[in-house]
Amino acid sequence: MRDTLSKLMALGAGALAMYYFDPRSGAERRALLAGLVKGGLQQGRSDARQAAIRRRGRGRAFHHIPSTDPQRDARLRDLIRERLGRMVSHPRAIDVQVEEGVVRLSGDVLSKERDGLLLQVNDIPGVEKLVNAMTAHEHPDSLATLEARQEAELAG
C-alpha cells in the first residue's frame, strides 16, 4: 500500500512539475500561482496576467508579436478568400477584411455553414482574432438573390 501511494505521489509531483515548467505556458502559470499566494485569488489573477503579458516580448521565439504588415494582411485575406469556395456554397456573398491579423467576415452565409466556416478560418495560421459580422440565412434562395444583387452592383 505504501509503495503504491509513493508511486502515485511521485507521478503527481512529476505532472505538477511538467505543468509549471512547460516552456510555452509555464512562466504565466508560475506568475499566476505567485500572485495567488501573495495577494489572494482575485488580485493575484490580474497581477499575474499583467506580469505574464509584460514578459511575453522578452526574446522568446515561441510568442508571436503581432506587427503592422499590410502585405501579410493582404496575403492572409487572399488565402481566406481562396479557401472560401471550399468552405461555403456562396463564397462571393462573404466579404473578408484583415487588419493586423484581425479577420472580419461580413456579408451573408447559410446558417448551417456558419459555424464550420468560423472554425476553419480561425484555424488558418496568421489569424490573431476572428470577428463574425455575417448575417445567417436559413434558406439558400435568399442568399443566392443577395449574391446576384451584389454581383450586379459590382459590374454596374
Image (cartoon, rainbow, N blue to C red):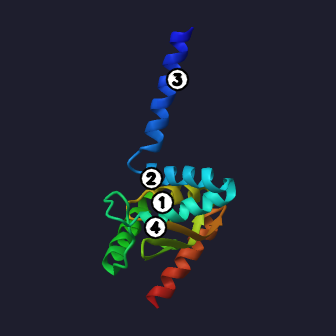
Report if the CB atoms under discs 3 and 1 are less than 8 Å apart: no
Which of the two residues, 121 or 87, is positioned nearer the viewer here?
A: 121
The image shows residue 57, relative to residue 120, as above or below, that is below
Callout 1: SS? helix
Q: Which residue is mark 2?
A: 27
Marks 4 and 1, Cα distance to the nearest angstrom? 25 Å
**Mark 3 or 1, closer to the camera:** 3
Q: Which residue is mark 4?
A: 54
| N-term mark: 3 or 1 | 3
Q: Which residue is mark 1?
A: 122
**Mark 4 or 1, closer to the camera:** 4
Query: Can I make out residue 49 in this image?
Result: yes
Callout 4: SS? helix
Locate residue 66: give its quadrant: bottom left
| N-term mark: 3 or 4 | 3
| N-term mark: 2 or 3 | 3
Q: Which residue is mark 3?
A: 9
Neighbourhood count class around disc 1 (C-alpha, 10 Å): few under 14, some 14–19, many 20 upward = some
Amino acid type for the residue under numbered disc 1 = Asn
Amino acid type for the residue under numbered disc 2 = Ala
Marks 4 and 2, Cα distance to the nearest angstrom? 11 Å
Marks 2 and 3, Cα distance to the nearest angstrom? 24 Å
Report if the CB atoms under discs 4 and 1 are less than 8 Å apart: no
Residue 104, position as x, y percentages in the image: 51, 73
Neighbourhood count class around disc 4 (C-alpha, 10 Å): few under 14, some 14–19, many 20 upward = few
| N-term mark: 4 or 2 | 2
Marks 1 and 2, Cα distance to the nearest angstrom? 26 Å
The residue at 48%/80% (across/down) is 151
Residue 33, position as x, y percentages in the image: 56, 49
Neighbourhood count class around disc 3 (C-alpha, 10 Å): few under 14, some 14–19, many 20 upward = few
